[in-house]
Amino acid sequence: MTETSRTSEEADADLIARSRREPEAFAELFRRHAPDITRYVTRRLGADAAEDVVAETFLTAFRQRARYDVARPDARPWLYGIATNLIGRHVRTEVRRLRALERTGVDPVTAPFTERSDERVSAAAVRRALAAALAALPAGHRDALLLVAWGGLSYEETAQALGVRIGTVRSRISRARSRMRRELGGADPTSLRPTVNEEPIGG
Amino acid sequence: MDEMTLLENLRSEVPPPESADLRRVEERLTAAITGSAAAERPRRRSSVPFRRPVVPLAAAGTALVLLGGALAVRGEEPGPKGHVVHVMPNRSVEVLDRAAEGVWRQRELRPAPGQYLVFETESMASAEGAVGEDGAYGRYLHRGRRKVWMPVQGRSLDAVVVDTVLPARRFPGYPLPATAPRTTRTGRPERLVDFDQRPEHLRTDYAYLSRLPTDPQGMYRHLYTGLGEGEEAHRQAWSRVCDLLCQAYMPAAQRAALFRAAGAIPGVTVVRNAEDGIGRKGVAAARVDRLTGERREYVFDPETYDFLGERSVVVDAAAAGAPVGTVVSYSVVLKADVSDSAPTPRPRS
């Protein structure tokens, strides 16, 4: 219809508020965020487990929409937080697959997408080292690290998602990075340049 | 590369999800949403039965047959017959997927009972018959604008229309007959139709459309209600999509389901560089009607995926009796809005 105007500027919070009266408005929130969240969960658990986790994430969010703080325009921290809790139920799957990658160099998570696999982005040794580091991290550290690295959340958003203080996020990520550097020290050194300037960690 | 960059690259070959996978997940959510909507908003049942005895009035000017006109009345549709169950095949058309997604970004009209949906459209249709001065056979392209007030709840018999006739166009290969309109002329408010013998499942009033399924599978079954099998069924199902889009308005959830369902109709393809009847560029989902030799295109805005209108283009000169590329009919939506009142129609003489 020519005169219908786009409401893509409508903030997530407005959508959620509207969905309390008009539940069907919630579907728009799914359309906005499901692609990214699906990819995020897939990277952590694999495609087979991701579908249920994503479905459950949005069903949970829908049921909890009355409790969303509409002062927060962007719903991503909320949604990623719910997804993170649900991923936690699959922690053994996640670690088992990371260990498999560490051991064999073959990644069960990316194997189904092999036709798209890009060897350039990470050499096998690097992948195995990173997998070792991720598998060894406490779950809360891994959550913080991957929300930033794969989820694209800021430290502040990660803190919201995990329900922890931003200082906690900083220290978790700092330790996770040290762990990765240690593991990578044993990996192909040519793929790594020493990080001279450690960026100050900030939110 | 520092360790964060290396980590960002890890598993970066995982692609964004396929739309079919997302749709499967979305359906689970939609089911929950719909359940909740039904619980929070009990359905209203229309107390007025739609089908009622009708007295067909003779159509004015029986020699002139307007093809593809926007009259709401159509008696040729057979009623439900047999028990052919149409299961939605697992296919989709990108344009219609985008349209389904676009629905949620568009301004939603929320007509209330007692109000009217007001549509302003421009259309062109092929007119043929004894249109020459001396009753000789002729063809031309009749064009008009119309503004229709459709009651949100209730029967199309209460709908009011103001028609504006626009200068006609020549049909390729035929001279413009003397009787064809050459000037713009706006009429007075009239009742849209004198009778409506459509079966229940072809109703297009908002109250009815609001109760249609919000899942693509359910909408697909609705499109095929009463249809048999094969090409003719698919042709009619595709045509019914237009009935639900042109001069009708359904809530976003149903509209999204309609686009997904339409994309599953066999034979539907994408036309990238499409154009609607008044020259607006767009992308279209289209289906060739082999019987008429025309391709029926539903055109969408390439950015917003707002529905712009429909158009029929000749693809088979022999079947259509017109050169390939001829636009034989179109209908574009100029405006859709809600109004509290409608003009009083002129009484029938």
Image: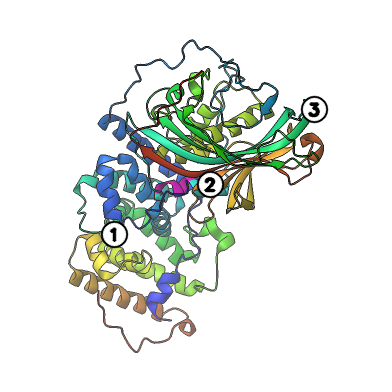
Mark 3 belongs to which amino acid? Ala
* Stretch of the chain drawn in magenta: B100-104
Disc 1 is attached to a residue of which chain?
Answer: A
Q: Which residue is mark 1?
A: A74
Q: Establish if A125 lies above or below A91.
A: below
Q: Which residue is mark 3?
A: B136
Circle 1 crowding by C-alpha within 10 Å: few under 14, some 14–19, many from 20? some
Mark 2 belongs to which amino acid? Leu
Mark 1 belongs to which amino acid? Asp
Q: Establish if B115 lies above or below A176.
A: above
Q: Position of residue B146 (x, y in %)?
A: 52, 37
- Kind of element beneath mark 2: strand
Q: Do marks 3 and 2 share a subunit?
A: yes
Was residue B101 drawn as part of the magenta stretch in this picture? yes
The C terminus of chain A lies in which quarter of the figure? bottom left
For the image shown, how many numbered marks are present on the structure?
3
Q: Tell me, yes or no, if residue A47 can be seen here.
A: yes
Q: Tell me, yes or no, if residue B289 can be seen here.
A: no
Residue lying furthest bottom? A196
Circle 2 crowding by C-alpha within 10 Å: few under 14, some 14–19, many from 20? many
Q: CA distance from mark 3 to mark 2?
A: 36 Å
Q: Which residue is mark 2?
A: B308
